[in-house]
Amino acid sequence: MNDNIQSYAGSAAGGTLVAERNRVLRNTYWLLALSMVPTVLGAWIGVETGIMARLGHGMSFLVFMIGAYGLIFAIEKNKNSAAGVPLLLGFTFFMGLMLARLLAMVLGFRNGGSLIMLAFGGTGAVFFGMATLSTVVKRDLSGMAKFMFIGVILALVAMVANIFIQSSSLMITISVLVIGIFSFFILHDLKRVQDGEETNYISATLGVYISLYNVFSNLLALLGIFGGQRD
C-alpha cells in the first residue's frame, strides 16, 4: 500500500515538473516573439533619425557596452518582479536602436531589403534548428558553454582591436566565429529550460534573444560584405 502511494506521489511530482518546464519554455517563446516588436521599432527609429550615424565607431561601441550591460544587470536584478518584462522590452528596443547603423549601411545597397530578409530567414533557420536539436541532445553542455564563453571574450577583444585596425578579413573572421558561438548558446539555453535548470522565463528569453541578435547582426554583416550590390 505504501509503495503504491509513494509511486503515485512520485508520478504526480514528475508530472508537475514536466508541466513547469513546459510552462517556462512556452512563456520564453511568447516573450521572445513579443521582444521582436520593440526591436523593430528601435531599429526603425534609429534608421529614420540617423541618431547612431552621428556617433563614431568608438563612441557607438562605448554606448552599446554601457547601455547593454547596464540593462542586462537591471533585468537579472528584477527578473522575479513585475519590472522584469518592461526592462527586457526596453533592452530589446535599445538593441534595435544599436542595430540601426548596420541596417542603414545594408539598406544603402540596391538589394539591401533582400539581404535583410535573407539574414532574418537564416537566423530563423538557426533558431528552429537549435530548438529542435535541444529536444534530442542528451549530453550535458555546461562544459562546452564555458569554452564558448572564452570564445566570446576573445571575439570581444578582437572587435575592440578592430576598431583601430579596421581589417576586413578580421571582421569576417569575427563574424563567422560569433555566429557559431551564439548558435551553440541558443541550443544551450533552450536545453537548460527543458532540463529544468533554468526556471525563470525572463532570464531564458534574455539569453536566447542576445544569441539571436548576434547571429542576425553578424550574418547580415557577412551578407553585406559578400552580397551587397551597389548602384
Image (cartoon, rainbow, N blue to C red):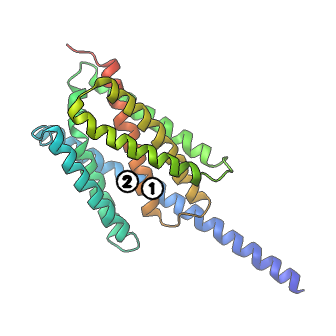
| Whether residue 175 is situated above or below residue 51 in the rendered picture | above
What mark, if any, has residue 34 been given in the picture? 2
**Residue 217 as seen in the image, left or right of residue 136:** left
Q: Quadrant of the N terminus?
A: bottom right
| Whether residue 90 is situated above or below residue 54 in the rendered picture | below
Residue on which the image places disc 1: 30
Three-letter code for the amino acid on which mark 1 is drawn: Trp
35 or 211, nearer to the observer:
211
Q: Position of residue 86 (x, y in %)?
A: 30, 64
177 or 92, nearer to the observer:
177
**Which residue occupies 53% across, 50% down?**
145
Q: Looking at this view, name the residue that lies furthest to the right.
A: 1
Q: Quadrant of the C terminus?
A: top left
Callout 2: SS:
helix
Q: Is residue 77 visible?
A: yes
Q: Is residue 186 visible?
A: no
User: Image quarter for residue 75?
Assistant: bottom left
**Which residue occupies 33% across, 38% down?**
158
**Which residue occupies 18% across, 44% down?**
60
Are circles 1 and 2 on residues that touch, CB within 8 Å? yes
Q: Position of residue 70 (x, y in %)?
A: 26, 61
What mark, if any, has residue 58 been given in the picture? none
Q: Looking at this view, name the residue that lies furthest to the left.
A: 54
Three-letter code for the amino acid on which mark 2 is drawn: Leu
